[in-house]
Structures are given as structure tokens and as C-alpha cells.
Image (spheres, rainbow, N blue to C red):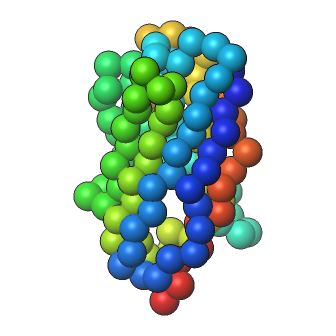
Amino acid sequence: VQLQASGGGLVQAGGSLRLSCAASGGTFRNKPMGWFRQAPGKEREFVAGISWSQTTTYADSVKGRFTISRDNVKNTLYLQMNSLKPLDTAVYYCAGRRREYGLVTERDSEYDYWGQGTQVTVSS
């Protein structure tokens, strides 16, 4: 499965962005998917995940502000980001697990497919 992330950009604090991740080359609908981010000088961290059954999981830092969703017809994963803060500035990556019907996990080592990343910059 190949993943292509898009939708990043520069936004002021309090603004919104919607990231997309288009999947191709394999079965998307039954695979757990997630969004991760990496800020300069920091380790990559889990942001949100969604299972094949649409169950969602969020990092505490984004709960109530970000929404992950998936469209299994369009083979696309989304991350709606509202009330953005400067601390949200990072490169955002979409990721997928090979195992169908598997669980969402916050450990990046358990994801098999990765998009190329899209930069999100939030100015104060």
C-alpha cells in the first residue's frame, strides 16, 4: 500500500486545516490507520488512529480539537485539525498497519506503511 499525504500549510493560531492521505496499491478498508507527527528536535508521536470499524483514538494533546476519519470508498484518510496551536507545528505523517482487522496502536514501530509527510506550521 502506498500512502500520499497532503493538505499541510501555514495557518495562524486558532485556525483550521484538513489533512488527507490517499491510499493506493492495496486493500485500505480493513486496515488500522493513524496519524503521527514529528516536531523539530523531537521524536515522532502518535496523534490519532482509526480502526476498520471506525473506532477512533486520540492523543490527549489533541482531544476535542482534531478529528480522524476515513472514506473507504475513496481510500482516503483524513485529519481535521481545529483550534490549532503553535505547539501543533510539525511534519504530519499518515500510516497504516498491514494486518487487516488489527487494533490501532500508538507505537509507530507497529505501522508498516508510511506517507511522505506534510508540513503544518502554526504561527502565534
Q: Provide residue 120's location: percent of width, then percent of height.
A: 59, 66
Q: In this view, does 41 lie above or below 118?
A: below
Q: Provide residue 68's location: percent of width, then percent of height.
A: 38, 43
Q: Which of 68 and 59 is in front in this view?
A: 68
Q: In this view, does 98 lie above or below 123?
A: above
Residue at the extreme left = 64
Q: Which image quadrant for residue 112?
A: top right
Residue 109 visible (yes or no): no
Q: Nearer the viewer, residue 7 or 120?
A: 7
In the image, taking residue 102 as reference, residue 24 lies left or right, namely right
In the image, taking residue 121 as reference, residue 32 lies left or right, namely left
Q: Residue at left 51%, top 52%?
A: 19
Q: Residue at left 30%, top 28%?
A: 55
In the image, taking residue 109 as reference, residue 58 lies left or right, namely left
Q: Provide residue 93's location: percent of width, then percent of height.
A: 62, 47
Q: Which image quadrant for residue 1?
A: top right
Q: Provide residue 11's location: percent of width, then percent of height.
A: 50, 77
Q: In this view, does 52 lie above or below 50?
A: above
